[in-house]
Image (tube, grey):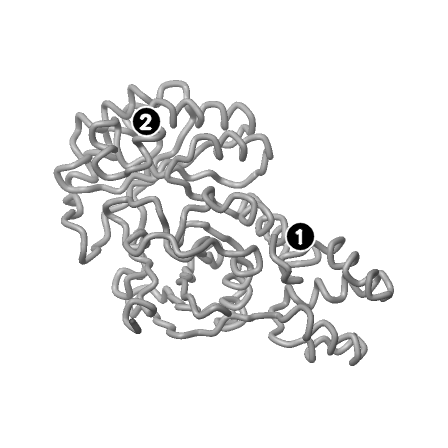
């Protein structure tokens, strides 16, 4: 776990301060300041100056910098490219909905999952993000935009369950009453299907929404677009989803990118219905977004509508995701470390 104070719980900060022979109440003060998005200990006005100096020297805050900020002319979606303390970059997206403002955060610099239709994985995995680096995306998006964040989706760059411990700590921190206090029920975590980690997550019994990127009704199709399927085939994945539901009582959301001629036929939808028996689920149909390196094309509107109707007639609720930020490459599967690529 990180040595950054912002990756620590209030109790852990308290232990650090005890070693410095500081009073216990300082832990809550520091925790609260850090979770307001301060960039310097000098902003912590109720801390003694000598303590601020020691903390700055031993525990730098390492706030990210905005390299680029793009706003969609179509829907007001904002995409941030952040430079982290080591020079690496990640992207974060702020989306505005009628129920509040949602931030889509990255969990890794790059991704090693290799999904054929996703830009985030093109350069492979560089490193995993620390808890504070995930928290900073939420905090500083809120600070920069001036908009209160009410919902979080872990659907940006990276596979959240490939960074399991750091993601769990981030969730604990962002849920803290003395921090941002964002309810678990307002958080969605997306995975391409790491079966052992889904089992592990189920034991935590968190009240978040698990979103599983399924994208195909069978192994034959899924193997061609998602390498993870060779390790954890469709039947294994759906079995763990059933176990997850039994352990948590939380209905799973299945993400399904609609790819022309690949996974969008009526027969594909009927096969999904057969496989999903006994598993309460919701399908999120996502018209495929353009990625210049990908040969795939989005399904037609008619194909998406037909697919949706087949699922709903079979008893599975399905919605077509509204595409936000398409004009600034901020939609599903489009996030990437573009700045580092351009600078090389």
10 Å crowding of disc 1: few (<14), some (14-19), many (20+): some
Find residue 140 and report its horizontal and vertical position in percent.
52, 68
Q: Is residue 138 above or below residue 207?
A: below
The disc, 2 or 1, on the residue closer to the chain's N-terminal end is 1
Along the line of sight, the residue nearer the viewer: 160 or 255: 160
- Figure quadrant of the C terminus: bottom left
* Disc 2 versus disc 1: nearer the observer: 2
Q: Which residue is mark 1?
A: 176
At mark 2, the secondary structure is helix
Q: Is residue 74 above or below residue 300?
A: below
Which residue corresponds to the image point at 66% horizontal and 58% vertical from the top-left? 179
Find residue 340 and report its horizontal and vertical position in percent.
34, 68
Asked whether the residues under the numbered discs 2 and 1 touch, taking CB atoms below 8 Å apart as contact, a structural biologist would say no
Along the line of sight, the residue nearer the viewer: 305 or 242: 242
The answer to which image quadrant residue 48 occupies is: bottom right
Q: Is residue 229 left or right of residue 300?
A: right
Q: Which residue is mark 2?
A: 234
């Amino acid at each position: 776990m990180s040595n950054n104070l912002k990756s620590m719980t209030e109790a852990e900060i308290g232990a650090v301060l005890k070693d410095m022979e500081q009073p216990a109440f300082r832990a809550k003060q520091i925790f609260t300041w850090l979770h307001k998005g301060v960039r310097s200990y000098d902003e912590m006005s109720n801390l003694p100056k000598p303590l601020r100096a020691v903390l700055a020297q031993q525990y730098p805050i390492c706030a990210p910098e905005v390299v680029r900020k793009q706003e969609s002319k179509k829907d007001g979606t904002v995409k941030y490219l952040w430079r982290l303390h080591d020079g690496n970059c990640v992207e974060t997206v702020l989306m505005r909905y009628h129920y509040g403002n949602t931030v889509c955060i990255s969990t890794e610099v790059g991704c090693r999952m290799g999904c054929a239709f996703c830009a985030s994985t093109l350069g492979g995995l560089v490193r995993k993000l620390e808890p504070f680096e995930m928290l900073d995306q939420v905090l500083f998006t809120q600070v920069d935009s001036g908009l209160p964040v009410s919902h979080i989706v872990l659907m940006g760059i990276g596979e959240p369950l490939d960074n399991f411990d750091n993601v769990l700590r981030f969730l604990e921190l962002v849920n803290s009453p003395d921090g941002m206090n964002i309810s678990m029920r307002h958080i969605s975590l997306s995975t391409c299907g790491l079966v052992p980690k889904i089992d592990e997550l189920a034991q935590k019994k968190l009240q978040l929404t698990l979103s599983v990127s399924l994208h195909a009704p069978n192994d034959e199709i899924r193997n061609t677009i998602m390498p993870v399927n060779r390790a954890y085939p469709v039947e294994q994945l759906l079995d763990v989803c059933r176990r997850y539901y039994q352990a948590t009582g939380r209905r799973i959301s299945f993400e399904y990118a609609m790819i022309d001629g690949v996974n969008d036929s009526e027969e594909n939808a009927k096969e999904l219905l057969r496989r999903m028996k006994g598993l309460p689920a919701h399908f999120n149909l996502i018209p495929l977004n353009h990625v210049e390196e990908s040969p795939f094309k989005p399904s037609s509107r008619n194909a998406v509508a037909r697919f949706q109707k087949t699922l709903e007639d079979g008893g599975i609720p399905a919605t077509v995701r509204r595409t936000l930020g398409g004009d600034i490459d901020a939609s599903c599967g489009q996030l990437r470390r573009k700045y580092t690529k351009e600078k090389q």
